[in-house]
Image (tube, rainbow, N blue to C red):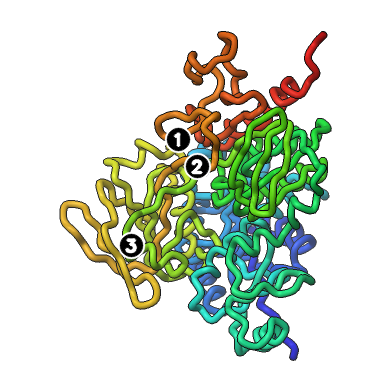
Amino acid sequence: MTETPRPKPVILLVVTETSRAVLTDEFSSRYARDYDIRVVTDVLTVTDYAASVIVEGQPIALICVDFDLDIDAVDVLDVLRNVSPSSRRIVLTPFSSFQASLEELRPALAVGRLDTYLLIPQGPRDEEFHTAIAEYLSEWATTTSTPEVVGVRIVEDGNQPAVAGIRDFLDRMGVPWSRYLPDSEVGRELLAEAGEGAELPIVKAFARPPLVGANEHLVASSFYGSPADLGDDYVADLVVIGSGPAGLAAAVYGASEGLQTIVFESEAVGGQAGTSSMIRNYLGFPRGISGMRLAFRARLQATRFGARIYTGRPVEGLTVGDVHKVAHEDGVIRARSVLIACGVRYRRLGVPALEDLVGLGVHYGAATSVAREMEGRDVFVVGGGNSSGQAAIHLARFARSVTIIVRRRALEETMSAYLVDEIATHRTIKVRTGSRIVDGGGDGRLEWIDLETDGVERLAADGLFLLLGAEPGCDWLPEEVARDENGFILTGRDVPKKLWVDGLPPAPLETTVPGIFAAGDIRSGSMKRVASASGEGAGAVSLVHAHLAPAPD
């Protein structure tokens, strides 16, 4: 049976007659095979034109507006954002207008009214221009569009809460997937392969046997095999626990400098940072980068240097000694040094009725894979940190309304200014301060929540995304590794003097146990930022080398 081809996504160019020829040629020559290039010069009709494209069933992937229009280009993007919120938005500036445009475009960019501004190509092979265009098309495809190529097939009937976690894992790993009903052609095929009476959901990944009654952990643990395959005699130079920015940086630098490096990750590579829809303040990425892409690139770097990464492998214990022993579900791996970079986990809301609906409209974390399904719906984001702001902005591309709920008096107390300013530009995002959720429910999935501010108000809700702040996730650590009163790991001079050895403090990122280090959010006193975590992970490797170096005669 031949599937009906999907309509091509649209690249919409809103241009002047002066730039029409060069931009039409520039985009058509590069992108016409995969995208429908639409060119509009009458700016007064472009809103209706864009709406008609959407009605016809063609998504608009990218909107590019000429700065030299007779009316303000950023205002045009503001209007078109209401028509197609998920489109990426770019202002194209002629060389002659570039300097004059900066004063207007930089402030607009800072508050999210556009994604970037680019100089119109002045000649052939302007690869910097096309690199930017390709990045935004790629970002749109991974976060908004249904995958064209399916790597993983999921069979479910809509009643399995585990599917949300599976999809989120696959999205964070950059793996395309598609869902099928049990009575579909693919569904019947996979049910037959799995065997009569097989429990849903069924997950078929690549050429492997189908996973029956699958959940996020089973899918994650099937990706890279088991560390038990290394053999009983294997001793790692460095075991990294956690694959957020700190863990990945340590894996890259450790493996590239010749250390036998193993990484354990309980979920998907990237940690909490990997769930961010867009990180805009990370050094070296002026156009921003999604957490998934940052983690994907770091993962490739680490594995190319020889690091072994095992997902779906939570560490269950650590025994200290001359050679440390790291316990996992398949056994024990020995390590000459250990870096604890397991980050933090979101606190639970503690409302039983809502805990029962996790995966059925209630989600911990950003759950970017679910955002596409929130189109035309009312959703709520609980939390006042940067991850909450990023999640709200991403959800606003799809949802009819997004409400951020915080207990504090203002977002500014806990959220970066650039996110607060961008949230203020979204007419679909509201902020409820001094509020908390006290109840919720629905028939089989989330339908309502009770919000307490001055009194209790019942609100219709289709999605609830909980990003409630951080608590350490290292209950498995032995007593020898000292922690502060909140459970975060003490390192360096933060270690109490009574625990110093020979009157000397541990090295800056070293714990109370020689050869065991900590970096990133799990470390007491850390900055809780992606860049600082990456720096600590890289810096820890030099301390590992010093620890492993032979003692001088």
> Which residue position is annotated with label 3?
352
Q: Is residue 391 left or right of residue 306?
A: left
Tell me the amino acid under the disc marked 3.
Answer: Pro
Please tell me whether residue 91 is drawn above or below residue 261 in the rendered image.
Answer: below
What is the secondary structure assignment of the residue under circle 2? loop
Q: Residues within 10 Å of mark 1 (few under 14, many from 20)?
A: some
Give the image location of residue 447, x and y in percent. 34, 72
What is the secondary structure assignment of the residue under circle 1? loop
Please tell me whether residue 158 is drawn above or below residue 412 in the rendered image.
Answer: below
Of residues 409 and 311, the one drawn nearer to the viewer in this rendering? 311
Give the image location of residue 136, x and y in percent. 64, 54
> Which residue position is annotated with label 1?
487
Q: Residues within 10 Å of mark 2 (few under 14, many from 20)?
A: few
Tell me the amino acid under the disc marked 2.
Answer: Asp
> Which residue position is annotated with label 2?
475
Mark nearest the camera among 2 and 3 is 2
The disc label shown at residue 200, or none: none
* N-term mark: 3 or 1: 3
Are dots 2 and 1 in contact, CB under 8 Å?
A: yes
